[in-house]
Image (cartoon, rainbow, N blue to C red):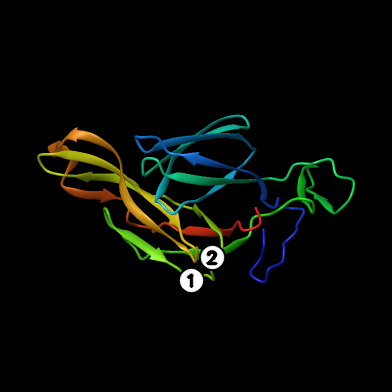
């Protein structure tokens, strides 16, 4: 990965996260979408002007499938970063770890983190948006290091399952806490109002994808 001074940090102890692939996903009429790919230990970032949440992932070995939620019909570009794999090139610099796996290959593109956005504790609230735009205009994707999930109970009506949804702008990004499923008639045991993790705030990691 790139350090704060714009240089790739290379070490035999850790793998640099290399760009593996990207795909454009169109969410269905119910706001859901899925994306399948092959990777070892992936980190997935998304670029979308509409809020989108990663609801979960399943894997069978190196085969992964992600489930996304957002605005019906919205398009999301997903970027997969993973440990580098040999590409059969006969030139450039390759660095291997002590176990013999590849740590760095100069023929690959690497994750370039350009900013970390941290909303204040408890923000955003239900159906509210928090946004920060600290960067020069560019093309950015967002990875969320921690996603809050919970419920919003409406007495006499519904229990709505909620999660942080992330989106990107030309100069940063933001979060919106919104629903992704409805339980149905309100149950007294579910309480009233928002019930969600508030001890720590999510972080939005912004990655420069202008050359990917």
Residue 136 higher or lower than 158, as above or below: below
The residue positioned 75% from the left and 50% from the top of the image is: 108
Would you call the spot at circle 1 few (<14 residues within 10 Å), some (14-19), or many (20 or more)?
few
Residue 174 higher or lower than 29, as above or below: below
From the top left corner, tell me how far across and down residue 152 is, in percent.
23, 46
Quadrant of the rendered structure where residue 56 is? top left
According to the image, label 2 marks what residue? 115
**In the image, which disc is placed on residue 15?**
none
Residue 162 higher or lower than 35, as above or below: below
The quadrant of the image that shows the N terminus is bottom right
The residue positioned 66% from the left and 66% from the top of the image is: 3
* Left or right: residue 36 compared with residue 19: left
Q: In the depicted view, which residue is nearer to us: 131 or 104? A: 131
From the top left corner, tell me how far across and down residue 131 is, in percent.
39, 64
Q: Residue furthest front?
A: 73
Say whether disc 1 or disc 2 marks the residue closer to the N-terminus. Answer: 2
| Cα distance in 3D space between marks 1 and 2 | 8 Å
Quadrant of the rendered structure where residue 140 is? bottom right
According to the image, label 1 marks what residue? 134
Mark 1 or 2: the one toward you: 1
Query: Do the CB atoms of the residues marked 1 and 2 lie less than 8 Å apart?
Result: yes
From the top left corner, tell me how far across and down residue 198 is, in percent.
32, 56
Quadrant of the rendered structure where residue 124 is? bottom left
Q: In the depicted view, which residue is nearer to us: 39 or 131? A: 131
* Left or right: residue 89 compared with residue 146: right
Secondary structure of the residue carrying tag 2 is strand
Secondary structure of the residue carrying tag 1 is loop
């Amino acid at each position: 990965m790139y350090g704060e001074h714009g240089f790739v940090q290379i070490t035999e102890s850790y793998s640099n996260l290399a760009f593996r692939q990207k795909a454009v996903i169109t969410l269905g009429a119910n706001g859901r979408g899925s994306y399948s790919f092959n990777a070892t230990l992936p980190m997935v970032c998304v670029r979308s002007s509409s809020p989108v949440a990663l609801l979960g992932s399943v894997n069978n070995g190196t085969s992964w499938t992600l489930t996304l939620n957002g605005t019906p019909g919205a398009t999301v570009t997903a970027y997969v970063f993973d440990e580098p794999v040999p590409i059969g090139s006969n030139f450039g610099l390759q660095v291997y770890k002590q176990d013999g796996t590849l740590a760095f290959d100069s023929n690959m593109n690497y994750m370039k983190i350009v900013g970390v956005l941290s909303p204040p504790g408890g923000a955003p609230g239900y159906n509210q948006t928090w946004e920060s735009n600290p960067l020069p205009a560019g093309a950015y994707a967002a990875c969320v290091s921690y996603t809050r999930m919970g419920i919003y109970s409406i007495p006499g009506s519904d229990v709505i399952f909620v999660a942080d949804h992330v989106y990107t702008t030309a100069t940063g990004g933001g979060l919106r806490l919104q629903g992704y499923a409805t339980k149905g008639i309100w149950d007294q045991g579910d309480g009233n109002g928002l019930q969600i993790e508030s001890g720590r705030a999510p972080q939005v990691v912004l990655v420069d994808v202008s050359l990917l």
